[in-house]
Image: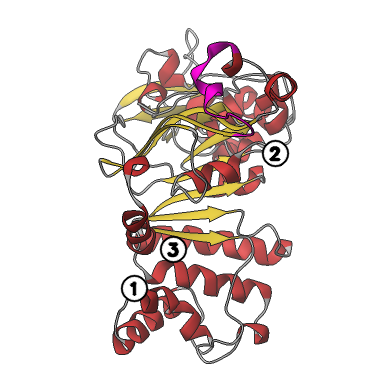
Amino acid sequence: MTAQLEYPEIDDDNALLSIQGLWKVFGPKAQRVPRRPELASLDRAALAAKTGCTAAVRDLSFNVAPGEVFVVMGLSGSGKSTLVRCLTRLIEPTAGSLIFEGEDLRAADEKRLRALRRSKFSMVFQHFGLLPHRKVIDNVSYGLEVRGESKPDRRRRAQEVIDLVGLAGNEHKYPEQLSGGMQQRVGLARALANDPDVLLFDEPFSALDPLIRREMQNEVVRLHREVGKTMVFVTHDLSEALKLGDRILLMRDGAAIQLGTGDELVGAPADDYVRDFVRDVPRADVLTLRWIARAPRDGEPLDGPELGPDTLVREATRLVLESDRPVKVVSEGQLLGVISDEEILAVVADPADKHWSARPADSRRGDSRSADRPGGSSPTSSAS
């Protein structure tokens, strides 16, 4: 799992991308649905029966921080792909606001939108969309060509990103000569070539074989570490979301169910739907020690080993089980709690216990670090 970023509180002024009250309704007289509370409150089936409309995105509000990997996750039909297309108005929203770097994207005309899509946003789709008659280097440089850059400049930039994504030596091959994973690397390189501020991924790896998919996930983690781009990543795969996401928005029927870090979804699911969604996740691979630390008992020795609160339970298991003293969980010199065999075994021995839940030790102590993480566990939080 990627290291969690320490975000400041993300208010609208500090967000790179701010979405507020976003709706996308398909059907006749769609505009009336978000405007009329008696319609907006109907579930999907009731709304379709009453109006003939489908609310693909329902009143979503969240902020994305600069440099964040923000994952949108849900099952088929949850609205996640519609949402990511609304962000650049490839699909026109029905209501709500889209603010990027302080600019209202819904007020942008077609000329401005084209400029933004060419310079500020790049999208990577599940289907690569490569031009079969163009070599790799020409596919990668295509966006720069559309933007009007000179051939030497676009070739130089294309070569840079080809090297970056591990395609060196394949510059003059055609797409049909490449494997699926290599073709997706070409798509990734093409998205990076424009040097966008935001990369949008719409289930880009779902058609790949498992081993290649894992390789591409590792590639995204590496690229994010090296180039630091803001990413909005759509997936239906929970393990992929946990591996890539700094925060995860879980959707169902167009609405937000929970927004938080991976450990928050696993450790403090908002409802039974989220609990069932994450029940098969090995908690030891996701939860950190802050989630299982407890207050020292009377007379308990406090001279045992120390670990930080962000240490994964899996990484701490051997030390805790081998120590004859409780392991102290310490942050900046402050004792947050202790961990002994029983806390470790409660997580490791029954990883699919659907009734297990907790709050971080520092939250229980009133430090409320989790509250400083934008979005927390609130289903429709604006991430502030």
Q: Residue at x 64, y 65 (%)?
A: 127
Q: Residue at x 50, y 10 (%)?
A: 297
Q: Is residue 52 left or right of residue 260?
A: right
Q: Label 3: few (<14), some or many (≥20) within 10 Å?
A: some
Q: Which mark is residue 147?
A: 1
Closer to the camera in the image, 142 or 184:
142
Q: Pointers 2 and 1 in contact (CB under 8 A)?
A: no
34 relative to 160, above or below: above
Q: CA distance from mark 3 to mark 1?
A: 24 Å
Q: Pinpoint residue 14: horizontal percent, then vertical percent.
A: 26, 36
Kindly report which numbered mark, 2 or 3, lies closer to the viewer in this rendering. 2
Q: Residue at x 73, y 35 (%)?
A: 280
Q: Which mark is residue 77?
A: 2
306 relative to 380, above or below: below
Residue that carries the numbered disc 3 in the rendered image = 223
79 relative to 53, above or below: below
Q: CA distance from mark 2 to mark 1?
A: 35 Å
